[in-house]
Image (cartoon, rainbow, N blue to C red):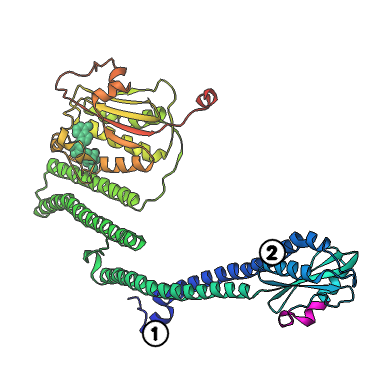
């Protein structure tokens, strides 16, 4: 019996901890990656927007600086105008401070020193003096943007200082939102994981119990039931299907063994009886030679039946083990002629004529020659057993659309409608079987059909009407079989169909 997981093993390596860990990991990684993907670019973007806002404001006010009147006495920009323009620029740039420095880095217009980031401020201004374009730097959440200007023919540097705390604040809000989402996500994953894992494990445990029951009690144990429309439900249904299939096979095997033993017992008992009588006669010294000859003949008939049964059982067991059949090109006309020839003597004895009709053109298939010959033998043997004297048995090969087929037709009693399917089952003889000479075991057609199916074909009892439509035997004979005389009945016609193989000329035309 297979070992079950211990409690500790279940806690460490069972499906529940693994599923939970996987769900937690997935939600943690998802939120972590989302945070990294959003927070850093968001911060970057907000800073760039800040720089752009300041630069646009400076560009918009640049003409006002260029055309600013200067004080005639000092040559410096008019203080009141400078104050207004700088204030408006600071407002436009989003609550920023604007400062004007001369090229000696002296502050022309008094800045608000409380906002000025002195150590970082002057290097930026100095760099702007040597460049035509904007220079900017972010120091301690403070953005410094500088641009060279000319007022009244003199060079100045306009420096705008803007606080970027709002960037940190916005990023902080989003970060907090992520943390809340992460906590909620992880909690949901945990609860969902526990719920799903518990439900799944309960169903898996039921399945495991069902297999354990099967192990203990065999195929009669109740099959697992799970109506879930998911993979576990599918597994349970496949399991139940497999169990009932095995049950059916087991029942069929038991029935087969029982019937086979019964069939074996009958000829063995009769053989034993005959030998016993012979022995009695020998012991009493009253042996009648003619009587003894008859008994030995009967005994030989029984051994022949036993050997036939042994061959059939061997064939069936080979079919059951699904041993592979050969597949090679086979011309059915030639095979039919050869097999039918084996029965000529028997046919003659029974005063039945064997009418072998060759195909109009070679009729190729790809099959196992031994198995096809076996099926034809089964069909001719049956026909010979049922055909009344002075009738004919017609054996023909031909093409029927995509099939190569062999038809075996006799004019015996035929098969009643209610037996048409049954006669193909193992150990099933028809009611008319007694009328046929030398009752068989009811295995021939079952073996024939299984062999035909294994070769991709079929073995069927066909209607005369269907035959005519297919251009089979009836039409070949003009629908008026010559041998329908005397005690001829409805007759039976069996068709073995195998996939046709196209010959080279057909392939060339296609
Ligand atoms: N040509 C036929 N005409 C009438 N009935 C037939 C014919 N062939 C088969 N049957 C019916 O089908 C039954 C099954 O045939 P099948 O060949 O399987 O077994 P069997 O001939 O009785 O025994 P076995 O072939 O094992 O020696 C027969 O018992 C018979 O009733
Ligand atoms: Mg038979």
Residue 156 at x, y = what percent?
86, 69
In the rendered image, residue 119 lying in the magenta stretch gets the answer yes
Observer-nearest of 382 and 26: 26
Q: Main secondary structure of the magenta part?
A: helix
Residue 457 as seen in the image, left or right of residue 21: left
In the rendered image, residue 401 lying in the magenta stretch gets the answer no
Instruction: Report the magenta residues as a range.
Output: 112-122
Q: Which residue matches tag 2?
A: 53
Residue 442 at x, y = what percent?
21, 43
As displayed, is residue 373 above or below residue 26?
A: above
Observer-nearest of 487 and 285: 487
Observer-nearest of 194 and 388: 194
Label 1's element?
helix
Is any part of residue 307 visible from this angle? yes
Badge number at residue 390: none
The first of marks 1 and 2 along the sequence is 1
Mark 1 in CB contact with mark 2 (< 8 angstroms): no
Q: Which residue matches tag 1?
A: 8
On-image quarter of the N terminus = bottom left
Observer-nearest of 44 and 32: 44
Q: How many angstroms separate mark 1 from mark 2 (CA)?
A: 63 Å
> Image quadrant of ligand 2?
top left
Q: Residues within 10 Å of mark 2 (few under 14, many from 20)?
A: some
Residue at position x 38%, y 22% from top?
Answer: 358
Is any part of residue 18 visible from this angle? no
């Amino acid at each position: 019996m297979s070992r079950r997981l211990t409690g500790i093993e279940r806690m460490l390596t069972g499906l529940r901890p693994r599923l939970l860990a996987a769900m937690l990991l997935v939600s943690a990684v998802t939120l972590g990656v989302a945070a990294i993907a959003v927070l850093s670019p968001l911060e970057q973007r907000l800073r760039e927007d800040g720089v752009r806002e300041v630069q646009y404001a400076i560009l918009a006010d640049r003409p006002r600086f260029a055309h600013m009147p200067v004080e005639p006495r000092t040559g410096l920009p008019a203080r009141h105008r400078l104050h207004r323009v700088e204030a408006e620029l600071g407002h436009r740039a989003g609550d920023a401070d604007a400062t004007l420095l001369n090229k000696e880095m002296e502050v022309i217009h008094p800045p608000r020193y409380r906002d000025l980031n002195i150590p970082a401020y002057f290097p930026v201004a100095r760099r702007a003096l040597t460049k035509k374009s904007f220079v900017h730097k972010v120091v301690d959440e403070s953005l410094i943007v500088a641009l060279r200007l000319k007022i009244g023919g003199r060079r100045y540097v306009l420096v705008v200082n803007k606080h970027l705390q709002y960037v940190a604040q916005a990023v902080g809000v989003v970060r907090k939102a992520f943390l809340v989402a992460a906590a909620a996500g992880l909690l949901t994953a945990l609860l969902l994981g526990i719920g799903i894992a518990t439900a799944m494990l309960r169903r898996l445990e039921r399945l495991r119990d069902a297999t354990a029951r099967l192990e203990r009690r065999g195929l009669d144990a109740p099959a697992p039931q799970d109506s879930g429309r998911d993979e576990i439900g599918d597994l349970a249904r496949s399991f139940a299907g497999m169990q009932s299939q095995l049950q059916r096979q087991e029942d069929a095997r038991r029935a087969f063994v029982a019937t086979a033993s019964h069939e074996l017992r009958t000829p063995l008992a009769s053989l034993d009886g005959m030998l016993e009588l012979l022995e009695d006669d020998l012991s009493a010294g009253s042996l009648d030679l003619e009587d003894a000859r008859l008994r030995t003949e009967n005994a030989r008939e029984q051994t022949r039946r036993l050997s036939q049964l042994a061959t059939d059982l061997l064939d069936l067991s080979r079919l059951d083990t699904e041993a592979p059949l050969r597949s090679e090109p086979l011309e059915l006309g030639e095979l039919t002629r050869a097999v039918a020839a084996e029965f000529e003597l028997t046919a003659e004895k029974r005063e039945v004529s064997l009418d072998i009709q060759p195909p109009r053109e070679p009729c190729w298939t790809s099959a196992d020659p031994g198995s096809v010959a076996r099926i034809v033998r089964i069909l001719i043997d049956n026909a010979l057993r049922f055909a009344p004297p002075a009738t004919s048995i017609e054996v023909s090969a031909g093409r029927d659309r995509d099939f190569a087929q062999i038809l075996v037709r006799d004019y015996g009693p035929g098969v009643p409608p209610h037996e048409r399917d049954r006669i193909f089952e193992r150990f099933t003889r028809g009611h008319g079987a007694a009328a046929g000479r030398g009752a068989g075991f009811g295995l021939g057609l079952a073996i024939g059909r299984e062999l035909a199916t294994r070769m991709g074909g079929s073995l069927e009892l066909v209607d005369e009407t269907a035959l005519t439509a297919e251009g089979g035997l009836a039409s070949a004979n003009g629908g008026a079989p010559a041998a329908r005389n005397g005690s001829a009945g409805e007759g039976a016609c069996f068709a073995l169909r195998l996939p046709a193989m196209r010959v080279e000329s057909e392939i060339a035309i296609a």
